[in-house]
């Protein structure tokens, strides 16, 4: 058995099912444990209410953000549980985890603390310029993870077909 613990990091994008499927297939074939991980970003939350020059209305901004975050967490937990059900159907031992913050950092940290042998994640396929300016989670993980990393290429939008995972 080459891999005993496989961490699959997914976002809520269109490739999530495909990336998860690759990780599940590997975990099933290897007899490995699987951890399904998602990172929530605070950057996507609105700032909250509008205030006036006296700051009235801003007092609820924190409460509004917390309520939105709680709803997002509840939705993520429900969404992640659908992946656990798929894995359990194949008798693959599966854990779920989410964190809030920077995905690259958390994927690296969760992989390290859980003792992952392999991290599986997708990539968005940004242009080189966009990746240079915006950064890349997959690039960060490849360069900073302490274990093997499989970057799943996924579906290409131009051709509409699957391409193999490959290093660029």
Image (cartoon, rainbow, N blue to C red):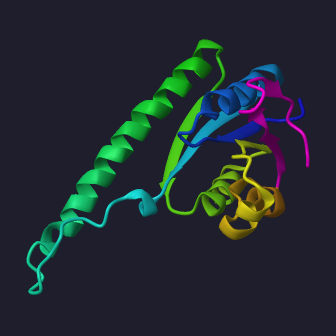
| In-image side of 119 versus 64 (left or right) | right
Is-magenta flag for residue 160? Answer: yes
Q: Nearer the viewer, residue 113 or 158?
A: 158
Q: Nearer the viewer, residue 157 or 136?
A: 157
Task: Work out which residue is located at the far front of the displayed protein and give it.
Answer: 158
Q: Quadrant of residue 3?
A: top right
Question: In x, y percent, where is residue 23?
Answer: 73, 31
| In-image side of 30 versus 97 (left or right) | right
Give the residue displayed 66% in from the left and 50% down from the top: 114
Q: Quadrant of residue 7?
A: top right
Give the residue displayed 63% in from the left and 38% down from the top: 35
| In-image side of 75 versus 139 (left or right) | left
Classify the position of the N terminus by image quarter: top right
Q: Nearer the viewer, residue 150 or 152?
A: 152
Task: Work out which residue is located at the far bottom of the displayed protein and give it.
Answer: 54
Is-magenta flag for residue 58? Answer: no
Question: In x, y percent, where is residue 86?
Answer: 58, 19
The residues colored magenta run: 147-168
Q: Nearer the viewer, residue 4 or 11?
A: 11
Q: Is residue 129 above or below residue 114?
A: below
């Amino acid at each position: 058995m080459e891999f005993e613990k496989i961490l699959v990091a997914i976002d809520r994008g269109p490739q999530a099912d495909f990336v998860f499927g690759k990780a599940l297939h590997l975990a099933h074939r290897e007899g490995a444990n699987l951890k399904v991980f998602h990172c929530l970003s605070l950057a996507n939350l609105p700032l909250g209410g509008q205030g006036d020059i006296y700051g009235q209305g801003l007092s609820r901004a924190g409460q509004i953000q917390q309520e939105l975050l709680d709803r997002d967490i509840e939705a993520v937990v429900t969404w992640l549980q659908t992946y656990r059900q798929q894995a359990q159907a194949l008798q693959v031992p599966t854990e779920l985890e989410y964190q809030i913050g920077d995905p690259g950092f958390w994927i690296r940290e969760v992989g390290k603390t859980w003792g992952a042998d392999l991290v599986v994640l997708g990539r968005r396929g940004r242009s080189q310029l966009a990746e240079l300016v915006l950064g890349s989670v997959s690039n960060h993980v490849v360069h900073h993870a302490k274990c093997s990393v499989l970057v799943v290429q996924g579906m290409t939008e131009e051709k509409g077909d699957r391409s193999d995972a490959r290093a660029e």
